Image (spheres, rainbow, N blue to C red):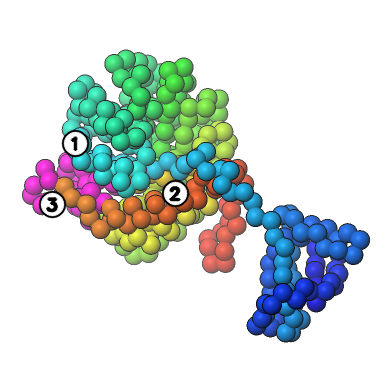
Amino acid sequence: YVTVFDEWTEVTVPVAELGYSNLYNASIQFQFATWNNGEVEYVLLDQVYMTLKADEELVVPTQIPNYEKYRGEKKLDVLAFWMPPIEDIHYQWMQEAGITALVIDNQYGAVEGAPLVKALSLCDKYGIDAYIMISREQANALYPSNYPYVTDHPSLKGFYVDEPLNEEQMNDIAAMVKAAEPMGLTVIVNKMPWTDADSNRWFDTAFADCGDNLIVCATNYPLLTDGIRSDWLEINGLTAESAATVSAPHWQFVATTGYGDRRQITESDIRWQYYAALAYGAKGIGDFSYCTPSYGGEWNDPQHAPIWWTDIDDTSTYYRADTYYYLQAVNQEISKFDHVLLSFDWQGVMKSAGSEASTTA
């Protein structure tokens, strides 16, 4: 016999004998809808539990959703940041790694003129969307008009602005978002990992009336040399909330290399960060850093970014490090189901015991 519980009813019904065995005291979860004229009707609604009596046998009728109907409709965007050299082989490697978008930053003179055109052409060849990086100090309503010679390039999808610091910068960037909309260009705005109320309120107010060409993301790297960033999940939640408040898609950066106080990354680390971002409704993932960049500072302390120098004294030659193959494996894994997951609207998260205090997400 099977005892079936739902919110209103407890009933006991006979179990069909169809050859199952070794289900002693089993507990099985399934979907239950109604109790109708002495028969159980099974549909995909509220989750309930069934408990078997010892040595009894069970069959549960099921209805599997037609997940195939979602195939090809939606895909997770995967954004690479720091860009590799503007050479064909590097763009081929990005495609093979599952990269679908690239921030064209100020290395190799790539944000203007012939280098920009070459980078966009390689993006077009390998099916990669391109976003030109603009500093938070430069962003304003007139800035998109600086690129008339590439505005119609098929691979140029828009601009990327990194970490606005104050209310004035946010308002200027919001004006740029509005100016880019009639040009058919999107602006990715990468938030600082804030937890203070003022900064998040400024952001939500500045971008409240932007159009459909805004993407909200944040840099939030949890994996430190001495542990895990304590406010990591809180920031994920606040970023998701900001995106929902301004009716924009939410992307999330993850750490794909170590530098400074951040430890070197394993395949499990990349997978863990991807799945956490997806749990918070991310429609895109930013991989940072995809390539060890060509200029100095803390970035020249390479810890095996996916694309890394062969020789620290010769930055002209790059190769694919172990982290490249970690990243490739995770992107291939996610691509098997992202079309299903992204077809649903994100509602919130439920944290497991041991996680930090819950946010309103």
Q: Secondary structure at mark 3?
A: strand
Q: Which mark is residue 149?
A: none
Q: Earlier in the sequence, mark 1 or mark 2?
A: 1
Rounded to the nearest whole Å, what is the CA distance between mark 2 and mark 3?
30 Å
Q: Residue furthest left?
A: 313
Residue extent of the magenta highlight: 289-317
Q: Which residue is mark 2?
A: 335
Q: Amino acid at mark 1?
A: Glu
Relative to residue 54, is residue 116 depicted above or below? above
Q: Quadrant of the N terminus?
A: bottom right
Q: Earlier in the sequence, mark 2 or mark 3?
A: 3
Q: Which residue is mark 1?
A: 87
Return the x and y of residue 295 as percentages of the image width and height. 17, 41
Residue at screen point 74% across, 81% down: 56
Residue at screen point 70% across, 81% down: 25
Residue at screen point 73% across, 78% down: 57
Q: Amino acid at mark 2?
A: Ser
Q: Which residue is mark 3?
A: 310
* Quadrant in which residue 113 is drawn: top left
How packed is label 3: few (under 14 Cα within 10 Å), some, or many (20 or more)? some
Q: Amino acid at mark 3?
A: Thr
